Amino acid sequence: MTSEARERSWADGKPIQYFRFTRGNVSWFLTNADRDQEYLGETWTSAAISRSAIRQGSDSAQLTIKVSMPSSLPVAANWRPYPASEAIVLTIFVRHAGESDAMAEWVGRVVGPKFDGAVLTLTGEPSRTRAKRAGNSKKWQRGCGSVLYGKGVGECNLEPEIVPVPATVTAVAELTFTLTAAGFALAPRSLAGGVLEWVEIEEPDPEDPEAEPIEHPRSRPIAAHAWPATTITLGAGDHLPAIGDAVTAYTRSLYVEATVTALSGLTLTAAAFASLPSGRLAGGFVRWARAADGLVEFRTIKAHSGNTIQLDYGALDLAPGLQLRAYPGCAHNWADCGYHANRHNYGGDLWMPVKNPFDGNPVW
Protein backbone atom coordinates (compact mmCIF):
# COMPACT_ATOMS: atom_id res chain seq x y z
CA MET A 1 0.00 0.00 0.00
CA THR A 2 0.90 3.67 -0.04
CA SER A 3 0.46 6.35 2.58
CA GLU A 4 -2.32 7.86 0.48
CA ALA A 5 -4.14 4.50 0.28
CA ARG A 6 -3.81 3.97 4.03
CA GLU A 7 -5.13 7.50 4.56
CA ARG A 8 -8.32 6.55 2.71
CA SER A 9 -8.72 3.20 4.45
CA TRP A 10 -10.97 2.51 7.43
CA ALA A 11 -8.55 0.67 9.70
CA ASP A 12 -5.17 0.28 8.00
CA GLY A 13 -3.83 3.72 8.87
CA LYS A 14 -0.72 3.96 11.08
CA PRO A 15 0.15 7.65 10.71
CA ILE A 16 3.46 9.12 11.82
CA GLN A 17 3.79 12.89 11.79
CA TYR A 18 6.92 14.77 10.79
CA PHE A 19 7.46 18.40 11.83
CA ARG A 20 10.01 20.50 9.94
CA PHE A 21 10.82 23.97 11.30
CA THR A 22 12.80 26.21 8.92
CA ARG A 23 14.43 29.53 9.71
CA GLY A 24 16.62 30.94 6.99
CA ASN A 25 18.94 28.14 5.90
CA VAL A 26 18.64 26.16 9.14
CA SER A 27 16.01 23.47 9.75
CA TRP A 28 14.96 21.31 12.70
CA PHE A 29 13.38 17.88 12.12
CA LEU A 30 11.08 16.27 14.71
CA THR A 31 8.67 13.32 14.64
CA ASN A 32 6.10 11.86 17.02
CA ALA A 33 7.30 8.30 16.25
CA ASP A 34 8.68 6.19 19.10
CA ARG A 35 12.15 6.21 17.51
CA ASP A 36 14.18 8.39 15.17
CA GLN A 37 13.12 8.26 11.52
CA GLU A 38 14.95 8.66 8.21
CA TYR A 39 13.05 10.67 5.60
CA LEU A 40 13.99 13.10 2.80
CA GLY A 41 17.64 12.38 3.51
CA GLU A 42 17.35 13.75 7.06
CA THR A 43 17.17 12.23 10.51
CA TRP A 44 13.95 13.19 12.28
CA THR A 45 14.38 13.15 16.05
CA SER A 46 11.76 11.35 18.10
CA ALA A 47 10.06 13.76 20.51
CA ALA A 48 6.86 14.20 22.52
CA ILE A 49 5.40 16.54 19.91
CA SER A 50 1.75 16.79 18.88
CA ARG A 51 -0.60 19.09 17.02
CA SER A 52 -4.25 20.08 17.23
CA ALA A 53 -6.79 19.18 14.56
CA ILE A 54 -6.44 20.76 11.12
CA ARG A 55 -9.59 22.64 10.16
CA GLN A 56 -10.91 23.93 6.86
CA GLY A 57 -13.12 26.98 6.41
CA SER A 58 -13.35 30.64 5.50
CA ASP A 59 -12.71 32.05 8.99
CA SER A 60 -8.96 32.54 9.21
CA ALA A 61 -9.11 32.72 13.01
CA GLN A 62 -10.31 29.10 13.08
CA LEU A 63 -7.57 27.80 10.78
CA THR A 64 -4.66 28.09 13.21
CA ILE A 65 -3.17 25.01 14.80
CA LYS A 66 -1.41 24.39 18.10
CA VAL A 67 1.82 22.41 18.27
CA SER A 68 2.99 21.27 21.71
CA MET A 69 6.48 20.01 22.56
CA PRO A 70 8.97 19.96 25.44
CA SER A 71 10.51 23.38 25.96
CA SER A 72 13.93 21.73 26.29
CA LEU A 73 14.12 20.84 22.58
CA PRO A 74 16.78 22.76 20.58
CA VAL A 75 14.15 24.31 18.29
CA ALA A 76 12.57 26.01 21.32
CA ALA A 77 15.64 28.24 21.63
CA ASN A 78 14.24 30.29 18.73
CA TRP A 79 11.65 31.76 21.13
CA ARG A 80 13.72 31.97 24.30
CA PRO A 81 14.15 34.58 25.70
CA TYR A 82 12.90 36.59 22.70
CA PRO A 83 10.93 35.54 19.61
CA ALA A 84 12.86 35.08 16.37
CA SER A 85 13.26 38.27 14.33
CA GLU A 86 12.36 36.45 11.10
CA ALA A 87 9.56 34.08 10.15
CA ILE A 88 9.88 30.39 11.05
CA VAL A 89 8.14 28.15 8.54
CA LEU A 90 6.47 24.96 9.75
CA THR A 91 5.72 22.06 7.42
CA ILE A 92 3.91 18.98 8.74
CA PHE A 93 4.15 15.71 6.82
CA VAL A 94 2.33 12.45 7.50
CA ARG A 95 3.71 9.04 6.58
CA HIS A 96 2.15 5.75 7.53
CA ALA A 97 4.28 3.09 9.19
CA GLY A 98 5.70 0.66 6.68
CA GLU A 99 5.41 3.04 3.73
CA SER A 100 8.15 5.05 2.02
CA ASP A 101 6.03 7.93 0.70
CA ALA A 102 4.62 10.82 2.70
CA MET A 103 2.19 13.69 2.23
CA ALA A 104 2.45 17.32 3.30
CA GLU A 105 -0.72 17.99 5.26
CA TRP A 106 -0.05 21.49 6.59
CA VAL A 107 2.24 24.40 5.61
CA GLY A 108 2.41 27.72 7.41
CA ARG A 109 4.44 29.77 9.83
CA VAL A 110 4.74 30.09 13.59
CA VAL A 111 3.04 33.27 14.80
CA GLY A 112 3.29 32.93 18.56
CA PRO A 113 4.92 30.88 21.34
CA LYS A 114 3.65 30.15 24.84
CA PHE A 115 5.85 28.64 27.54
CA ASP A 116 4.07 26.80 30.33
CA GLY A 117 6.63 25.17 32.55
CA ALA A 118 8.27 22.35 30.62
CA VAL A 119 5.85 22.64 27.69
CA LEU A 120 6.11 24.98 24.70
CA THR A 121 2.94 25.56 22.69
CA LEU A 122 3.31 27.18 19.28
CA THR A 123 0.49 28.76 17.30
CA GLY A 124 0.74 28.19 13.56
CA GLU A 125 -0.99 30.12 10.80
CA PRO A 126 -1.53 28.59 7.33
CA SER A 127 0.31 30.28 4.47
CA ARG A 128 -2.87 30.90 2.48
CA THR A 129 -4.55 32.96 5.22
CA ARG A 130 -1.68 35.46 5.31
CA ALA A 131 -1.83 35.87 1.53
CA LYS A 132 -5.53 36.77 1.69
CA ARG A 133 -5.19 39.54 4.27
CA ALA A 134 -6.22 42.96 3.07
CA GLY A 135 -3.70 44.77 5.25
CA ASN A 136 -3.69 48.51 5.91
CA SER A 137 -4.24 50.60 2.81
CA LYS A 138 -2.24 53.79 2.36
CA LYS A 139 -3.72 56.98 3.74
CA TRP A 140 -3.90 60.35 2.00
CA GLN A 141 -1.52 62.36 4.14
CA ARG A 142 1.32 64.83 3.98
CA GLY A 143 3.82 62.56 5.65
CA CYS A 144 5.22 59.53 3.86
CA GLY A 145 3.49 56.30 4.82
CA SER A 146 5.86 53.98 2.95
CA VAL A 147 7.89 51.41 4.85
CA LEU A 148 11.55 52.42 4.87
CA TYR A 149 13.55 50.23 2.44
CA GLY A 150 10.30 48.58 1.28
CA LYS A 151 10.36 47.29 -2.30
CA GLY A 152 7.65 47.41 -4.96
CA VAL A 153 5.51 49.77 -7.00
CA GLY A 154 4.59 52.82 -4.92
CA GLU A 155 6.96 51.83 -2.10
CA CYS A 156 10.08 53.50 -0.68
CA ASN A 157 12.50 51.46 -2.84
CA LEU A 158 15.52 52.94 -1.08
CA GLU A 159 18.39 50.47 -1.49
CA PRO A 160 20.73 50.57 1.53
CA GLU A 161 23.30 48.18 0.06
CA ILE A 162 26.06 48.96 -2.44
CA VAL A 163 24.54 49.15 -5.94
CA PRO A 164 26.65 48.56 -9.08
CA VAL A 165 25.92 50.90 -12.00
CA PRO A 166 27.44 49.80 -15.34
CA ALA A 167 28.20 52.49 -17.91
CA THR A 168 30.27 53.28 -20.99
CA VAL A 169 32.42 56.40 -20.91
CA THR A 170 31.56 58.91 -23.65
CA ALA A 171 33.70 61.88 -22.56
CA VAL A 172 36.76 62.47 -20.37
CA ALA A 173 38.05 65.78 -18.97
CA GLU A 174 41.56 64.97 -17.77
CA LEU A 175 42.19 68.31 -16.04
CA THR A 176 39.10 68.07 -13.82
CA PHE A 177 38.92 64.26 -13.59
CA THR A 178 35.36 64.41 -14.91
CA LEU A 179 33.76 61.51 -16.77
CA THR A 180 30.54 61.46 -18.75
CA ALA A 181 28.37 58.38 -19.30
CA ALA A 182 24.64 58.03 -19.79
CA GLY A 183 24.57 55.09 -17.38
CA PHE A 184 25.50 57.30 -14.42
CA ALA A 185 22.03 58.88 -14.58
CA LEU A 186 20.48 55.46 -13.92
CA ALA A 187 22.02 55.20 -10.45
CA PRO A 188 19.41 54.89 -7.68
CA ARG A 189 21.04 57.78 -5.80
CA SER A 190 24.15 59.94 -5.91
CA LEU A 191 27.37 58.10 -6.67
CA ALA A 192 29.41 60.51 -4.53
CA GLY A 193 31.35 58.58 -1.92
CA GLY A 194 31.32 55.45 -4.03
CA VAL A 195 33.98 53.82 -6.19
CA LEU A 196 34.55 53.58 -9.95
CA GLU A 197 36.12 50.38 -11.28
CA TRP A 198 37.29 49.45 -14.76
CA VAL A 199 39.86 47.28 -16.52
CA GLU A 200 42.76 48.91 -18.35
CA ILE A 201 44.09 46.89 -21.28
CA GLU A 202 47.83 46.95 -21.94
CA GLU A 203 48.46 46.11 -25.58
CA PRO A 204 51.01 43.34 -26.25
CA ASP A 205 54.44 43.92 -27.71
CA PRO A 206 53.93 43.99 -31.52
CA GLU A 207 57.33 42.34 -31.98
CA ASP A 208 56.33 39.34 -29.87
CA PRO A 209 53.80 37.20 -31.78
CA GLU A 210 52.99 35.14 -28.67
CA ALA A 211 52.34 38.10 -26.41
CA GLU A 212 48.78 38.68 -25.21
CA PRO A 213 47.03 41.78 -23.87
CA ILE A 214 47.44 42.32 -20.14
CA GLU A 215 44.44 43.38 -18.03
CA HIS A 216 45.01 45.81 -15.16
CA PRO A 217 42.07 46.30 -12.75
CA ARG A 218 41.76 49.99 -11.81
CA SER A 219 39.65 51.88 -9.30
CA ARG A 220 39.23 55.44 -8.07
CA PRO A 221 36.94 57.07 -5.53
CA ILE A 222 34.02 59.14 -6.79
CA ALA A 223 34.27 62.63 -5.30
CA ALA A 224 31.12 64.26 -6.68
CA HIS A 225 27.95 63.42 -8.57
CA ALA A 226 24.92 65.71 -8.84
CA TRP A 227 22.37 62.91 -9.21
CA PRO A 228 20.81 62.22 -11.70
CA ALA A 229 23.46 63.88 -13.86
CA THR A 230 25.48 61.93 -16.39
CA THR A 231 28.84 63.25 -15.17
CA ILE A 232 30.93 62.32 -12.15
CA THR A 233 34.12 63.76 -10.70
CA LEU A 234 36.79 61.35 -9.52
CA GLY A 235 38.98 61.67 -6.48
CA ALA A 236 42.73 61.28 -6.25
CA GLY A 237 44.34 58.56 -8.33
CA ASP A 238 46.87 57.76 -11.04
CA HIS A 239 44.68 56.41 -13.82
CA LEU A 240 41.67 57.49 -15.88
CA PRO A 241 39.41 55.38 -18.09
CA ALA A 242 39.37 56.21 -21.78
CA ILE A 243 36.43 57.05 -24.02
CA GLY A 244 34.60 53.85 -24.87
CA ASP A 245 35.76 51.98 -21.77
CA ALA A 246 33.20 49.94 -19.88
CA VAL A 247 33.17 51.00 -16.24
CA THR A 248 31.17 50.15 -13.15
CA ALA A 249 30.30 52.82 -10.60
CA TYR A 250 29.31 51.66 -7.13
CA THR A 251 27.15 53.69 -4.79
CA ARG A 252 28.27 53.96 -1.21
CA SER A 253 26.32 51.89 1.28
CA LEU A 254 23.89 53.64 3.60
CA TYR A 255 24.68 51.39 6.56
CA VAL A 256 27.70 51.61 8.85
CA GLU A 257 29.86 48.66 9.87
CA ALA A 258 30.38 48.70 13.62
CA THR A 259 32.04 46.66 16.35
CA VAL A 260 30.37 46.91 19.75
CA THR A 261 32.82 48.12 22.39
CA ALA A 262 30.47 48.45 25.35
CA LEU A 263 27.01 47.28 26.36
CA SER A 264 24.73 48.64 29.07
CA GLY A 265 21.26 47.15 29.07
CA LEU A 266 19.86 47.88 25.62
CA THR A 267 22.42 50.62 24.88
CA LEU A 268 25.29 49.73 22.54
CA THR A 269 28.47 51.73 22.10
CA ALA A 270 30.58 51.70 18.93
CA ALA A 271 32.81 54.36 17.39
CA ALA A 272 31.24 53.87 13.94
CA PHE A 273 27.84 55.08 15.18
CA ALA A 274 29.34 58.57 15.54
CA SER A 275 30.11 58.70 11.80
CA LEU A 276 26.48 59.72 11.25
CA PRO A 277 24.74 62.74 12.83
CA SER A 278 23.01 62.07 16.14
CA GLY A 279 19.50 60.77 15.59
CA ARG A 280 20.15 59.57 12.03
CA LEU A 281 20.12 55.89 13.06
CA ALA A 282 16.92 56.27 15.12
CA GLY A 283 14.08 54.40 13.47
CA GLY A 284 16.51 52.20 11.56
CA PHE A 285 17.74 48.78 12.57
CA VAL A 286 20.83 46.70 13.26
CA ARG A 287 21.52 43.26 11.84
CA TRP A 288 24.15 40.67 12.58
CA ALA A 289 24.84 36.99 11.97
CA ARG A 290 24.78 34.70 14.98
CA ALA A 291 28.13 33.01 15.58
CA ALA A 292 26.54 29.67 16.49
CA ASP A 293 24.54 28.99 13.32
CA GLY A 294 24.86 31.98 10.98
CA LEU A 295 21.21 32.99 11.35
CA VAL A 296 20.54 36.71 10.99
CA GLU A 297 19.08 38.76 13.83
CA PHE A 298 17.43 42.18 13.52
CA ARG A 299 16.66 44.81 16.15
CA THR A 300 15.03 48.23 15.76
CA ILE A 301 17.03 51.28 16.84
CA LYS A 302 14.94 53.43 19.18
CA ALA A 303 17.45 56.20 19.83
CA HIS A 304 20.84 57.37 18.57
CA SER A 305 23.22 59.85 20.16
CA GLY A 306 26.86 60.13 19.16
CA ASN A 307 28.52 56.74 19.44
CA THR A 308 25.61 55.05 21.24
CA ILE A 309 22.31 53.54 20.11
CA GLN A 310 19.41 52.05 22.05
CA LEU A 311 17.60 48.94 20.80
CA ASP A 312 13.98 47.91 21.28
CA TYR A 313 14.85 44.57 22.93
CA GLY A 314 17.91 42.45 23.59
CA ALA A 315 19.51 39.25 22.37
CA LEU A 316 21.89 36.65 23.76
CA ASP A 317 24.51 37.62 21.17
CA LEU A 318 24.73 41.25 22.26
CA ALA A 319 28.17 41.64 23.82
CA PRO A 320 31.36 43.66 23.32
CA GLY A 321 33.15 42.50 20.19
CA LEU A 322 29.96 41.82 18.22
CA GLN A 323 30.22 42.99 14.61
CA LEU A 324 27.02 44.36 13.12
CA ARG A 325 25.56 46.71 10.55
CA ALA A 326 23.48 49.73 11.54
CA TYR A 327 20.99 51.07 8.99
CA PRO A 328 19.75 54.69 9.15
CA GLY A 329 16.15 55.53 9.95
CA CYS A 330 13.81 58.06 8.38
CA ALA A 331 11.40 60.66 9.77
CA HIS A 332 9.03 59.97 6.82
CA ASN A 333 8.94 63.62 5.81
CA TRP A 334 10.09 65.59 2.77
CA ALA A 335 13.34 66.72 4.39
CA ASP A 336 14.50 63.22 5.30
CA CYS A 337 13.49 61.93 1.88
CA GLY A 338 15.80 64.56 0.42
CA TYR A 339 18.61 63.47 2.73
CA HIS A 340 18.38 60.00 1.20
CA ALA A 341 18.02 61.44 -2.36
CA ASN A 342 14.77 59.50 -2.64
CA ARG A 343 12.15 62.20 -3.16
CA HIS A 344 11.00 60.61 -6.42
CA ASN A 345 9.58 57.82 -4.23
CA TYR A 346 8.02 60.07 -1.58
CA GLY A 347 4.78 58.51 -0.42
CA GLY A 348 3.02 61.61 0.94
CA ASP A 349 1.22 64.60 -0.58
CA LEU A 350 2.84 67.91 0.35
CA TRP A 351 -0.02 69.88 -1.19
CA MET A 352 -2.82 68.15 0.66
CA PRO A 353 -5.17 70.85 2.02
CA VAL A 354 -5.09 71.23 5.78
CA LYS A 355 -8.79 72.11 5.96
CA ASN A 356 -11.51 69.54 5.43
CA PRO A 357 -13.41 70.44 2.21
CA PHE A 358 -16.48 68.58 3.48
CA ASP A 359 -17.08 70.51 6.72
CA GLY A 360 -20.07 72.38 5.28
CA ASN A 361 -18.26 75.65 4.53
CA PRO A 362 -18.31 76.36 0.77
CA VAL A 363 -15.14 78.47 1.12
CA TRP A 364 -12.04 76.49 1.99
Image (tube, rainbow, N blue to C red):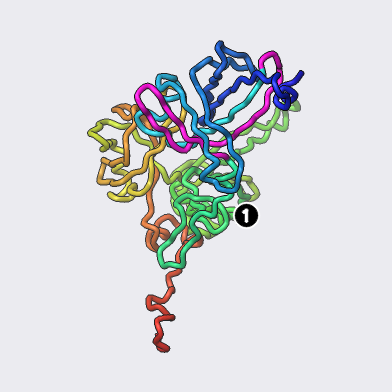
Picture quadrant where residue 3 is located:
top right
Residue in the foreground of this view, choosing between 192 and 333: 333
Residue displayed at 58% across by 47% down = 131
Can you identify the residue that label 1 sits on?
170
Residue 15 versus residue 115 in the image, above or below? above
**Where's the N terminus, which quadrant?**
top right
Residue 243 versus residue 363 in the image, above or below? above
* Residue 48 in sight from this viewpoint: yes
Residue displayed at 73% across by 27% down = 8
Query: Percent from the top left, x then y, of residue 173?
Result: 53, 55
Question: Magenta part of the protein: which range?
Answer: 97-126
Query: Percent from the top left, x then y, of residue 214?
Result: 64, 31
Task: Assign the magenta stretch its main secondary structure.
Answer: strand
Residue in the foreground of this view, choosing between 25 and 70: 70
Magenta span contains residue 291? no
* Residue 172 in sight from this viewpoint: no
Query: Percent from the top left, x then y, of residue 205?
Result: 69, 31
Residue displayed at 42% across by 59% down = 337
